[in-house]
């Protein structure tokens, strides 16, 4: 459960030890709406998210899941009433929620990316969420050499900076300047590295750039996004008001109001590290959590 969305992964172990997805779901519930200012989860956001948790836990059990792990990230970390949400999940869905740190979130996201793309080159993994963005550097052996979580994400930046629809150039410039200042503290990445982007902002930009609708993970996982792709897609989305953005092929309507800020984070990260292209991963934190707890 992130700031913006709730994701379900049910997997089955094969005779050779591989974990294969049986079901995957995603629902945008916006748990972290308003948390940046109020530091509280709203009753409406809690209720919407708990309904998704109930539904997902029931589906997992019906499919025969013998172990269920539920994690929460940035919004639950920041909210002073996060305990209300945790207690609600236990009472209504019979699950215990783990609030994981930004450092742990980074480790799990890197583990997932390394499983699919690691081994030959050093990796830099970029995980853009609704409330935070993680950078993780690692060597070909899978050992993490640097990780940092920044309190910038698609929902948080939209709430802080975007007041017009579509966003004004001044608002876009303000976000760009702030991100450039924050990411300037990143150390130089390892020589010959490959950059991998995970989570909803990245996969959505890939789907929009390639007009993948309905969404097909097989067409997104491993796709390459160039800087030209990102600039073209960002310009297109930023020029549209939200009600028209919702009609863009490849873009979930519930993500339409925050995707521009997310795209700005993506572009700023590419600029900060000096990369011309990014490999897209459809398997983020949830796959890292699966491997960590059950493999």
Image (cartoon, rainbow, N blue to C red):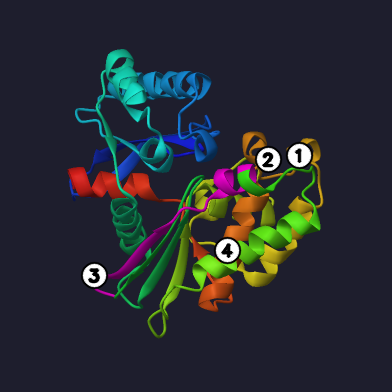
Identify the mark nearer the N-term, 4 or 3.
3
Judge by depth and name the residue closer to the eye, 219 or 121.
121
Give the alpha-carbon distance from disc 2 to disc 1, as whole Å: 6 Å
Identify the mark nearer the N-term, 2 or 3.
3
Give the alpha-carbon distance from disc 1 to disc 3, as whole Å: 41 Å
**Image height of 192 relative to 69, above or below:** below
Q: Are marks 1 and 4 in contact (CB under 8 Å)?
A: no
- Assess disc 1: are there few (<14), some (14-19) or many (≥20) residues with their C-alpha within 10 Å of its C-alpha: many
Q: Residue at x 47, y 18 (%)?
A: 47
Judge by depth and name the residue closer to the eye, 209 or 160.
160
Residue identifier under label 1 = 242
Residue identifier under label 3 = 143
Q: Residue at x 44, y 74 (%)?
A: 194
Question: Residue reaching furthest bottom?
Answer: 191
Residue identifier under label 2 = 257
Give the alpha-carbon distance from disc 2 to disc 3, as whole Å: 37 Å
Disc tally is 4
Circle 2 sits in a helix, a strand or a loop, which is it? loop
Q: Which residues are magenta?
A: 140-159
Q: State the image quarter where residue 187 is shown.
A: bottom left
What mark, if any, has residue 179 been given in the picture? 4
**Image height of 92 relative to 17, above or below:** above
């Amino acid at each position: 459960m992130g700031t913006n969305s709730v994701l379900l992964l049910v997997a089955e172990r094969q005779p050779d030890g591989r974990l294969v997805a049986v079901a995957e779901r995603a629902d945008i519930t916006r748990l972290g709406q308003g948390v940046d200012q109020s530091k509280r989860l709203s009753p409406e956001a809690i209720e919407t998210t708990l309904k998704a948790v109930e539904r997902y836990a029931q589906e997992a059990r019906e499919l025969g899941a013998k172990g269920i792990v539920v994690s929460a990230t940035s919004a639950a970390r920041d909210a002073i009433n996060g305990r209300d949400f945790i207690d609600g999940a236990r009472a209504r869905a019979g699950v215990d929620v783990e609030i994981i740190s930004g450092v742990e979130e980074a480790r799990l996201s890197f583990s997932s990316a390394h499983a699919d793309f690691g081994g030959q080159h050093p990796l830099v993994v970029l995980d853009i969420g609704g409330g935070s963005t993680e950078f993780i550097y690692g060597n070909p052996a899978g050992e993490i050499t640097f990780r940092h979580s920044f309190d910038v994400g698609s929902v948080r930046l939209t709430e802080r900076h975007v007041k017009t629809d579509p966003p004004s150039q001044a608002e876009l410039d303000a976000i760009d300047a702030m991100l450039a200042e924050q990411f300037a503290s990143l150390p130089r990445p390892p020589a010959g590295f490959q950059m991998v982007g995970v989570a909803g902002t990245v996969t959505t930009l890939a789907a929009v750039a390639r007009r993948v609708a309905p969404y097909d993970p097989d067409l997104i996982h491993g796709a390459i996004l160039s800087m030209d792709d990102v600039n073209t897609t960002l310009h297109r989305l930023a020029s549209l008001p939200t009600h028209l953005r919702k009609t863009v092929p490849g873009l979930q309507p519930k993500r339409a109001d925050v995707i521009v800020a997310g795209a700005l984070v993506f572009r700023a990260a590419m600029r900060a590290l000096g990369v011309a292209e990014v490999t897209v991963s459809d398997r983020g934190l949830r796959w890292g959590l699966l491997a960590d707890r059950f493999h």
